[in-house]
Image (cartoon, grey):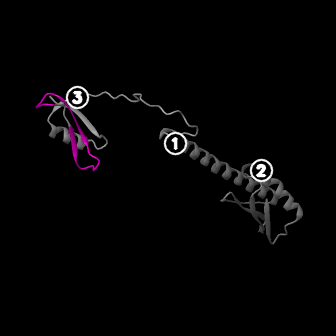
């Protein structure tokens, strides 16, 4: 831990430095010992102000508190900083959890699962309505999230499938022979 203390109208004593080191050790459980701290202590009127700026793991945290007692100001700053660090850690943990859930949902997992092959994984049920291929095309255009539509062709009375081509502008039609 690297601590730099600046005093304005107040001398930074060895006791203040030791107190700061002791209190800042609460942050070491979050970052280890790779912490840079800039502490500014000053007096304004009858209050003593302690401002702490902490840089650790590429993150910056800042707290400023005033009290009649400098040690109480430091305690208040440490509580504020620890709250900020906990909030950041919780946010990062939640983001990491969400990312790993997304990876699993997209077919990527932390542990490789055996690949499933030759299995029917999803079954969908829906009504097949009689209509002309032109009407089926209009229905498919009205539902942009569907890639195909199964219908009964009113002219041939057979099941047909109309689908979107890869160009996204044109359609294909599947008709059974005979």
Residue at left offset 82%, top offset 57% = 21
Residue at left offset 81%, top offset 60% = 70
Q: Is residue 175 visible?
A: yes
Q: Earlier in the sequence, mark 3 or mark 2?
A: 2
**Which is nearer the eye, 85 or 140?**
140
The image quadrant of residue 9 is: bottom right
Quadrant occupied by the N terminus: bottom right
**Alpha carbon separation for disc pair 1 and 3:** 35 Å
Q: Which residue position is annotated with label 1?
A: 103
Instruction: Find residue 23 and report its horizontal and vertical position in percent.
Output: 80, 53
> Helix or strand or loop: what does disc 3 sit on?
loop
As drawn, which residue projects farthest toward the left? 155
Q: Earlier in the sequence, mark 1 or mark 2?
A: 2
> Helix or strand or loop: what does disc 1 sit on?
helix
Q: Which residue position is annotated with label 3?
A: 128
Tag in front: 1 or 2: 1
> Helix or strand or loop: what does disc 2 sit on?
helix
Above or below — where is 68 with respect to 87? below
Disc 1 vs disc 3: Cβ atoms closer than 8 Å?
no
The reply, left or right, for residue 128 in relation to residue 40 is: left
**Which is nearer the eye, 170 or 64?**
170
Residue at left offset 16%, top offset 38% = 133
Magenta segment = 153-173
Q: Which residue position is annotated with label 2?
A: 26
Q: Is residue 50 visible?
A: no
Quadrant occupied by the C terminus: top left
């Amino acid at each position: 831990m690297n601590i730099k203390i600046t005093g304005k109208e107040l001398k930074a004593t060895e006791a203040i430095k030791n107190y700061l080191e002791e209190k800042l050790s609460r942050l070491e459980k979050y970052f280890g010992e790779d912490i840079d701290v800039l502490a500014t202590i000053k007096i304004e009127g009858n209050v003593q102000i302690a401002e702490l700026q902490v840089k650790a793991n590429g993150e910056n945290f800042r707290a400023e508190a005033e009290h009649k007692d400098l040690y109480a100001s430091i305690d208040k700053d440490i509580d504020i900083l620890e709250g900020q660090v906990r909030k950041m850690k919780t946010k990062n943990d939640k983001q990491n959890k969400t990312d790993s859930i997304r990876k699993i949902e997209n077919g990527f997992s932390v542990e490789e699962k055996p690949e499933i092959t030759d299995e029917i994984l999803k079954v969908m049920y829906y009504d097949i309505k009689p209509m002309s291929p032109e009407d089926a095309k209009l229905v498919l255009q009205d539902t942009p999230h569907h890639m195909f539509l199964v219908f009964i062709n009113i002219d041939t009375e057979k099941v047909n499938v109309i689908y979107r081509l890869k160009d996204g502008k044109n359609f294909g039609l599947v008709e059974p022979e005979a």
